[in-house]
């Protein structure tokens, strides 16, 4: 049901956006986003990158010269639905039609991005496990989350889910605990946007 809603959301969101203009804007958006934590990321020419939960215009578009694996359970749907998403535009990206929980790769990555995605997984513990498994020791994981500001509202959302696209409802400290339990140290938690119910954070992790 959540994947159906996600697919419909993207169709509605992009239907009036010209593909070229949107992708140019999105690449600049990712550049500005990446600059906020660049000090933690040491990308070399041979760095291996993964973008888990990439969507149709994920951070993979920022790295045209790198080997990237981009993973999303709706890759095939985006190809069918959206003129904004054409795999031929990204010759160095390997696209994998898979959920984060089902993704298993023998290759280990220097940097793993999971942007606006961990809230969507069906099994949060397994999702974290997969993120860590595919990262090299000492590699970086960039994780973004929407975190509750008010405990009483969090409990209401947990009991009566009001957001079908985000089945997991937690506070920042809880997400940080999940990261540590998965085998990572937190280098920084960056507040990127404030709102009444949720704040939007990027957590920069290093695999131990």
Image (cartoon, helix red, strand yellow):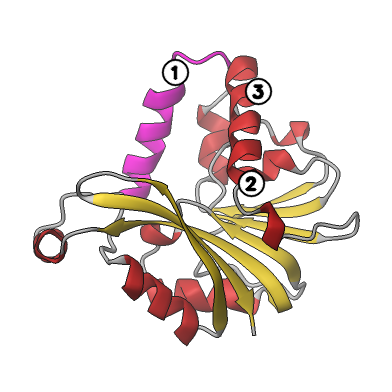
Residues under labels 3 and 1: Cα distance?
16 Å
Instruction: Between label 3 and label 1, give the one nearer the viewer.
Output: 3
Q: Earlier in the sequence, mark 3 or mark 2?
A: 3
Instruction: Between label 3 and label 2, give the one nearer the viewer.
Output: 2
Per the image, the residue denoted by label 2 is: 34
Per the image, the residue denoted by label 1 is: 15
Residues under labels 1 and 2: Cα distance?
27 Å
Q: Which residues are magenta?
A: 1-18
Q: Badge 2 local density, few (<14 within 10 Å), some, or many (20+)? A: some
Q: Earlier in the sequence, mark 3 or mark 1?
A: 1
Name the residue at the right extreme: 45
Q: Kindly check if marks 3 and 2 are in contact, taking CB atoms under 8 A apart as contact.
A: no
Is residue 81 found inside the magenta-colored segment of the image? no
Image position of 29 (left or right of 66): left
Q: Position of residue 145 (x, y in %)?
A: 41, 57
Disc number placed over residue 24 in the picture, else none: 3
Residue drawn 20% across the image and 50% down it:
197
Q: Nearer the viewer, residue 96 or 117?
A: 117
Residues under labels 3 and 2: Cα distance?
15 Å
Q: Is residue 186 above or below residue 74?
A: below
Residue drawn 36% across the image and 33% down it:
9
Residue drawn 47% across the image and 71% down it:
127
């Amino acid at each position: 049901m959540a994947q159906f809603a996600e697919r419909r959301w993207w169709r509605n969101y992009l239907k009036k956006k010209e593909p070229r203009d949107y992708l140019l804007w999105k690449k600049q958006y990712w550049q500005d986003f990446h600059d906020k934590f660049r000090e933690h990321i040491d990308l070399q020419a041979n760095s291996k990158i993964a973008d888990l939960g990439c969507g149709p215009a994920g951070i993979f578009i920022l790295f045209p010269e790198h080997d990237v694996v981009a993973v999303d359970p709706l890759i095939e749907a985006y190809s069918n639905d959206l003129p904004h998403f054409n795999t031929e535009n990204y010759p160095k990206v390997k696209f994998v039609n898979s959920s984060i929980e089902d993704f298993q790769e023998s290759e280990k990555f220097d940097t793993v991005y999971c942007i606006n995605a961990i809230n969507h997984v069906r099994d949060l513990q397994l999702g974290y496990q997969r993120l860590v498994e595919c990262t090299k020791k000492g590699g970086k994981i960039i994780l973004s989350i929407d975190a509750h500001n008010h405990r009483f509202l969090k409990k209401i959302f947990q009991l009566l889910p009001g957001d079908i696209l985000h089945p997991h409802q937690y506070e920042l400290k809880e997400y940080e605990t999940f990261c540590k339990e998965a085998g990572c140290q937190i280098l920084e938690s960056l507040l990127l946007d404030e709102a009444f119910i949720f704040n939007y954070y990027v957590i920069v992790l290093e695999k131990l």
